[in-house]
């Protein structure tokens, strides 16, 4: 399977999003915060007169360490009719998966485990394939 | 489903709706050939269409009906009530079968033969409530009226060419146009920033105009005449009234009014419910009606009218009306309210109890109504589409339901407000009034941790938007700096929402938001600002629900107080005038001291300085910048804020009027307080504060200066005092401790003046000049000049 993947960096790790699900990669300029929402929802941004919900991928995985978003790049995805901008630390090129996503013994670690569809081999080495549906639903709310 | 089949179902449906009213009209006047033709066409078309598909039962039914109707058309048979009932029964069966086809279900076998047999001339009349009608072939006159209007409409429908389109596609196109409008706005903003560019501005204007047209026609694409909705109602009314042994006729007004297709479907159920209620509870039986001195046929009237972005639909019956006491008793019996709460309610509020959940006024549950689905569901359905419903009733005379519906579902009128650094939109329909926290007639109070605001005699709970959204703590909130929005929910609950500022009101295109944001229950959607930034639409009913602002005795008692006061306090007297540019404006009447006419020569304008001379006084002039001054005589409004005066140049003074509508604030023009409706026209209301702030009025109103006059002198009291007062001074009293601006003393009076004064005028008793700076007490001119010199000196 040679699935195309958008290579990016989330919380300092190599990660990949299936390219077929990504409409575009944008530079997020202004974010309108939405008070009252969970932390990982940074707010709304506008793209060609459409409002996108901006998700901080790192926070969405439940990883505390938010690195500086130097580039403010985000992958635009559509889930159930709603548009989201998945903010990542870095967005690299689109690459090819050299293998099927596989699980690794011992899991990928807390946070990653839930959102990862598995590990794929790429030209740049092993990479985590991320499930965008899990990203937008955010970290599990233990309290709830 | 096969596309052809879908078309068949849709076509059958459409024809069904149209022929429903035709049938009823035909029944009233069976000799009407046009009606028979329509119904004949329907069954014929169904029969014909069935040939393409394999629907033998449908074909059989329609064929039988067609035959019977053909007999009538040929004049071989007189259509009677039995036939009409039989044909209706067949049409109903066709409709049910069509539903089954659409759903892909199997229609239960059997029953067709009985229906077909009922068509034959000598068939026994089925045991149905229709018998009543059969006995008294209802009053022809009113039914004819109805028939005629329907006849007048019928041909129009056939002339218009039309095709069917999937709603999804329409939605897509509408969305596209909305986005284009936003993109245009963004472009407009960038063009503004870049300054004037003649080569671009022209085409851009053209683009804007085209876009406005397209937007308009797209909106119309989704619109449908209310006629569409109305046409199915006569049938419903007929069936219901037959079942209940009542006679009801329907009257439609405004069926040409157009409404969003989706909206029409949304209001269909609520409307049906209201009709059921009206016929079941409202309209009496013929016998009761005759006894009450009414016509035995009840009237159900539908009137629709478009006003701006709203459609108002009034449904009136001339039945028995709502017995408010009975409703109130019921509410107590059901434990909804205590007797003391009910006692405090006005009749209007008691009437509104019918919208309370769990309250049915039906004495017994009939098959028509009283089945637990109440008016509360009707109300919530209407509110869900952004509308409102009100009831008014007069015992013994009838009941009216007033529905207000938005034209479309996705565009709403909103108020944009600021909280923190962000802007939010609030649906305009909830906003009752906007007041500033620092206004003199607003008082804050605290009860426990709850902030209350007292405004015009009503005490309402306060919520700070910043606190609701989590950015601000209630304890540190500076309420006095906030702007309060009085929110009235559809449930009649009132609370105040404190925001940092109010920007403007505009129509916004609302779009759905992601589920994770929806979960907060704070927002109802999102919309884009002109500059392309997103803005959240606040979900007021949900916030009110979460914060316990809904229901409860507290707000209800407040409501009573409110209703009485609202009438009085809302009318604000204003003066209407035409500015120098000819545009109509209004100014609060309190501000206007008097109207003067002066010659053009008395006005002096130089650069930013504009002044007018009135009665030898120089006064600041405003309003001159709205247009050219008249050539000879100039009308001036003398405005006063209580301390300062200035004159405002106008072209013409028009009229006095009362503002009863809201003043809608405008951010764009700081010179006006807002825009209000006077006699149906939008009139900008001059912002007195801004005018006085801008044209720094120089002249103080005189009475702010005080003057002491000799005490114990009769001359001073009787002669001097009026003169001094006329010159604009206030006479300082004996116990006035404060230093007066001026004191007048008599020269022969050596006694020092009690209390201090900054200036003193001494009067001498003799006309001869005594060489000092005294003034002869009867030298009026000199005295007035001195008074004026001191006054203007001080004021400057």
Image (cartoon, rainbow, N blue to C red):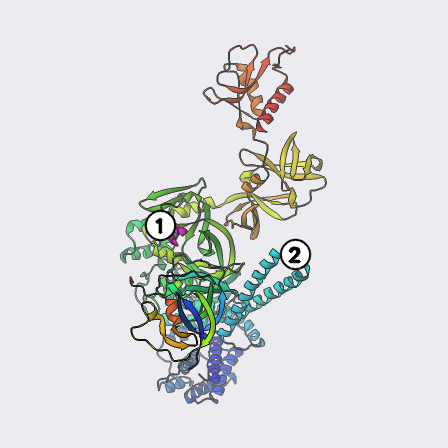
Please name the residue shown 50% across and 82% down the image.
B40
Label whose residue precedes the other's in the sequence (1 or 2): 2
Q: In which quarter of the image is the C terminus of chain A?
A: bottom left
Let me know if residue B794 appears in the view: yes
Q: Are marks 1 and 2 in contact (CB under 8 Å)?
A: no
Mark 1 closeness class: few <14, some 14–19, many ≥20 residues within 10 Å: some
Q: Quadrant of residue B455?
A: top left
Q: Nearer the viewer, residue B273 or B133?
A: B273
* B17 relative to B772, above or below: below
The answer to whether dots 1 and 2 both sit on one chain is yes
Q: What element carries label 1?
A: helix
The mark total stands at 2
Q: Where is residue B22 in the image (x, y as percent from the top left)?
A: 49, 75
- Which mark is drawn over residue B539? none
Q: Position of residue B757 (x, y in %)?
A: 52, 20
The residue under label 1 is: B555
Between residue B688 and residue B55, name the one nearer to us. Answer: B688
Name the residue tied to disc 2.
B196
Taking the spot 36% from the left edge, 42% from the top edge, the residue there is: B445
Where does the image place residue B636, in percent across and percent down from the top left? 63, 38
| Residue B421 sits inside the magenta stretch | no
Q: Which of B41 and B210 is in front in this view?
A: B210
Picture quarter containing residue B329? bottom left
Q: Which chain carries label 1?
A: B
**Dot 2: chain letter:** B
The foreground one among B631 and B501 is B501
Sort mark 2 into few (<14), some (14-19) or many (20+) by Cα contacts within 10 Å. few
Element under disc 2: loop
Q: Where is residue B325 in the image (x, y as percent from the top left)?
A: 33, 54
In the rendered view of the protein, which quadrant contains the N terminus of chain A?
A: bottom left
Magenta residues span B464-472
Nearer to us: label 1 or label 2: 2
């Amino acid at each position: 399977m040679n699935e195309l993947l958008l290579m990016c960096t989330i919380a300092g790790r190599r990660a990949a999003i299936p390219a077929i699900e990504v409409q575009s990669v944008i530079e997020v300029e202004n974010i309108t915060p939405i008070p009252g929402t969970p932390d990982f929802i940074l707010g709304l941004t506008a793209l060609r007169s459409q409002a996108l919900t901006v998700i901080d991928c790192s926070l969405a995985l439940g990883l505390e360490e938010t690195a500086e978003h130097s580039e403010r790049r985000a992958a635009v995805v559509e889930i159930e009719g709603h548009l989201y901008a998945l903010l990542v630390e870095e967005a690299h090129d689109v690459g090819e998966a050299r293998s099927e996503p596989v699980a690794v013994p011992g899991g990928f670690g807390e946070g990653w485990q839930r959102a990862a569809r598995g590990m794929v081999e790429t030209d740049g080495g092993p990479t985590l394939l991320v499930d965008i549906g899990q990203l937008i639903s955010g970290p599990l709310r233990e309290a709830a | 489903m096969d596309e052809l089949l879908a078309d068949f179902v849709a076509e059958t449906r459409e024809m069904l709706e149209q022929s429903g009213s035709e049938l009823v009209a035909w029944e009233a006047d069976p000799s009407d050939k046009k009606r028979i033709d329509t119904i004949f066409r329907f069954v014929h078309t169904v029969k014909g269409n069935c040939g393409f598909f394999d629907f033998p039962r449908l074909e059989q039914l329609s064929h039988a009906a067609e035959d019977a109707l053909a007999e009538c058309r040929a004049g071989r048979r007189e259509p009677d009530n039995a036939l009409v009932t039989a044909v209706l029964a067949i049409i109903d069966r066709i409709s049910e079968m069509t539903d089954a086809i659409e759903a892909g279900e199997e229609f239960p076998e059997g029953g067709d033969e009985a229906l077909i047999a009922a068509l034959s001339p000598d068939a026994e009349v089925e045991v149905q409530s229709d018998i009543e009608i059969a006995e008294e072939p209802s009053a022809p006159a009113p039914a004819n009226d109805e028939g005629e209007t329907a006849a007048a409409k019928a041909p129009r429908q056939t002339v218009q060419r039309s095709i069917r389109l999937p709603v999804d596609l329409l939605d897509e196109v509408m969305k596209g146009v909305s986005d284009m409008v936003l993109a245009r706005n963004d472009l407009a903003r960038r063009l503004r920033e870049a300054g004037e560019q003649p080569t671009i501005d022209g085409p851009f204007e053209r683009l804007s105009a085209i876009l406005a047209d397209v937007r308009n026609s797209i909106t119309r694409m989704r619109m449908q005449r209310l006629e569409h909705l109305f046409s199915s109602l006569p049938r419903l009314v007929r069936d219901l009234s037959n079942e209940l042994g009542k006679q009801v006729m329907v009257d439609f007004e405004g069926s040409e009014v157009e409404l969003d297709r989706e909206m029409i479907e949304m209001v269909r159920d609520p409307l049906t419910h209201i009709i059921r209620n009206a016929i079941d509870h409202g309209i009496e039986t013929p016998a009761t009606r005759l006894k009450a001195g009414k016509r035995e046929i009840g009237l159900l009237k539908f009137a629709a009218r478009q006003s701006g972005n709203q459609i108002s639909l009034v449904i009136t019956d001339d039945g028995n009306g709502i017995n408010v006491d009975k409703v109130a008793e019921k509410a107590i019996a059901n434990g909804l309210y205590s007797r003391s709460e009910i006692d405090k309610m006005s009749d209007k509020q008691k009437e509104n109890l019918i919208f309370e959940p769990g309250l049915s006024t039906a004495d017994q549950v009939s098959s028509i109504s009283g089945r637990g689905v109440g008016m509360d569901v009707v109300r919530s359905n209407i509110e869900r589409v952004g509308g409102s419903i009100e009831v008014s009733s007069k015992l013994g005379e009838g009941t009216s339901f007033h529905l207000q519906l938005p034209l479309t579902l996705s565009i709403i009128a909103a108020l944009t407000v600021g909280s923190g650094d962000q802007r939010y939109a609030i649906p305009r329909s909830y906003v009752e009034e906007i007041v500033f926290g620092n206004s003199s007639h607003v008082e804050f109070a605290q009860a426990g941790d709850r902030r209350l605001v007292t405004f015009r005699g009503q005490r309402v709970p306060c919520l700070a938007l910043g606190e609701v959204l989590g950015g601000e703590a209630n304890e540190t909130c500076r309420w006095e700096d906030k702007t309060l929005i009085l929110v009235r929910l559809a449930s009649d609950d009132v609370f105040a929402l404190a925001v940092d500022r109010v920007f403007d009101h505009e129509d916004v295109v609302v779009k759905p938001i992601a589920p994770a944001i929806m979960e907060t229950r704070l927002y109802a959607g999102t919309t884009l600002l002109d500059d392309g930034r997103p803005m959240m639409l606040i979900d007021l009913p949900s916030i009110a629900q979460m914060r316990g602002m809904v229901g409860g005795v507290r707000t209800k008692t407040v409501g009573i107080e409110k209703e009485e006061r609202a009438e009085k306090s809302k009318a604000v007297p204003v003066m209407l005038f035409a500015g120098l540019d000819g545009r109509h404006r209004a100014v609060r009447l309190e501000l206007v001291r008097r109207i003067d006419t002066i010659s053009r020569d008395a006005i002096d304008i130089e650069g930013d300085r504009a002044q007018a001379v009135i009665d030898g006084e120089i006064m600041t002039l405003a309003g001159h910048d709205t247009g050219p001054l008249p050539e000879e005589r100039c009308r001036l409004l003398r405005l006063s804020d209580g301390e300062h005066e200035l004159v405002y140049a106008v072209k013409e003074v028009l009229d006095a009027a009362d503002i009863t509508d809201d003043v809608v604030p405008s951010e764009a023009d700081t010179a006006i307080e807002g825009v209000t409706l006077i006699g149906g026209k939008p009139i900008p209301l001059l912002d007195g504060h801004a005018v006085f702030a801008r044209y720094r009025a120089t002249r103080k109103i005189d009475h702010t200066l005080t003057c002491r006059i000799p005490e114990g002198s009769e001359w001073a009291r009787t002669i001097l005092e009026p003169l001094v007062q006329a010159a604009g001074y206030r006479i300082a009293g004996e116990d006035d401790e404060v230093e007066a601006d001026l004191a007048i003393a008599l020269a022969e009076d050596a006694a020092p003046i009690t209390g201090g004064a900054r200036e003193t005028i001494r009067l001498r008793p003799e006309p001869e000049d005594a060489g000092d700076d005294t003034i002869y007490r009867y030298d009026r001119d000199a005295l007035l000049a001195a008074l004026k010199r001191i006054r203007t000196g001080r004021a400057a």
